[in-house]
Image (cartoon, rainbow, N blue to C red):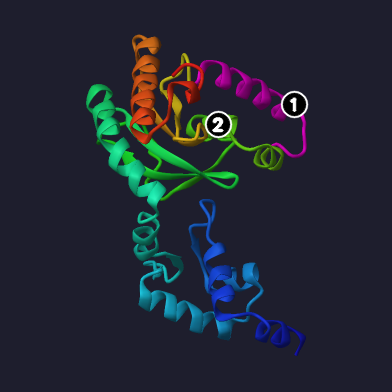
Amino acid sequence: MAGNSRERGQSVASRLLRVLDAFSAARPELSLADISRTTGLPSATLYRLLRELTDHGAIQRTSTGRYAVGLRLWEIGRLAPAVSRLDEVAVPYLAALYEATHGASHLAVPLGAEALCVVAISGLQTVQPVLPAGARVPLESPGIGRVLLAYASPDVLAEVLEGGGRSTYRIRQELVEIRRSGVAVTGVGSRSFSVAAPLVGPHGAVMAAVSVAVRTTGDSLVLIRMVRRAAARISRELGTSADAAVPGL
C-alpha cells in the first residue's frame, strides 16, 4: 500500500523520466525487471509506461526482448540549439580530419559527469573501438572525456574525483597539463594514438570537444597541430573571441 501511495503521488511525466534515466552507457539494454529494480516502480505500471514509450519511439525492443533507448529521443535531442549549431559548424571539420587521418573523429558535449558523443565519423580501417554517436563515457575517461573534465565546473570536478586516492591525484595532474597545453593526448608509444581539444563558446566557456584517434602516427605533433587548428576554427565560428581562447588554441 505504501508503494502504491508513493506512486500515486508522482506525475506520469516524473515516472516516464525515471524510466528513461534508468538507461546509461554502462546499461544500454535493460529487462523489465532491471528497470523495475532501478526505478522502484512496479512491473504493472512499468509495462504500461514502456508500451507508451515504445509506441512513441522513445524506447525500442531489442532482438533479445530487452528495452533500449529509441531513435526518437536521439532525433529530439539533436534539435537542442547548442547541439544543432555544433553539428552545423563542427561536422565539416570532423570530416576533414577523417579524410586527412582516416582516424575516428568525434564531437562530444558534457552532460553532468559524462561526455555525450553527438557526432562520430569513422571508416572500416579506423582504430577500434569507435565511440558511436549517442554513447556516453565518464568524464574521467582518457581522451575526449578527460579534456571536458579539465574545463568542468568545480561541482562536477568534485563529483567525478570524489574519493581521492592515487588515481585521482594522477588525473588531477593530467588535468593541469591539459589546461596548460589545451589538448589531451593519449596512447603515446602504443598502437593507437588520440588527441582531443576543447571547443570554446561565445562566452568563453568550453561547450564541447573534438578528438581524433588513429592506429599509429609517424609524427604525433602533426596530429596535435591538426586537432588544435580544427578546434580553434570551430570555436571562432561558434563566436568565441581571441581573449576567450583556451591555452594551445
Left or right: where does residue 36 sit relative to residue 193?
A: right
Q: Residue at x 66, y 86 (%)?
A: 8
Crowd band around label 1 with a 10 angstrom C-alpha radius: few (<14), some (14–19), many (20+): few
Query: Judging from the image, what secondary structure is the residue with disc 2 in?
Result: helix
Range shown magenta: 161-184
Q: What amino acid type should be assigned to the residue bearing mark 1?
A: Arg
Name the spot of residue 77 as percent of width and height, x first: 40, 57
Query: Judging from the image, what secondary structure is the residue with disc 1 in?
Result: helix
- Nearer the observer: mark 2 or 1; the answer is 2
Crowd band around label 2 with a 10 angstrom C-alpha radius: few (<14), some (14–19), many (20+): many
Q: Nearer the viewer, residue 197 or 187?
A: 197
Name the spot of residue 223 as percent of width and height, x first: 36, 17
Q: Nearer the viewer, residue 38 or 234?
A: 234
In the picture shown, does residue 9 fall above or below 58?
Answer: below
**Residue 235 lies in the magenta stretch:** no
Q: Which residue is mark 2?
A: 146
Q: Quadrant of the N terminus?
A: bottom right
Residue 125 visible, this angle:
no
Left or right: where does residue 165 sit relative to residue 213?
A: right
Q: Which residue is mark 1?
A: 166
In the picture shown, does residue 197 fall above or below 30?
Answer: above
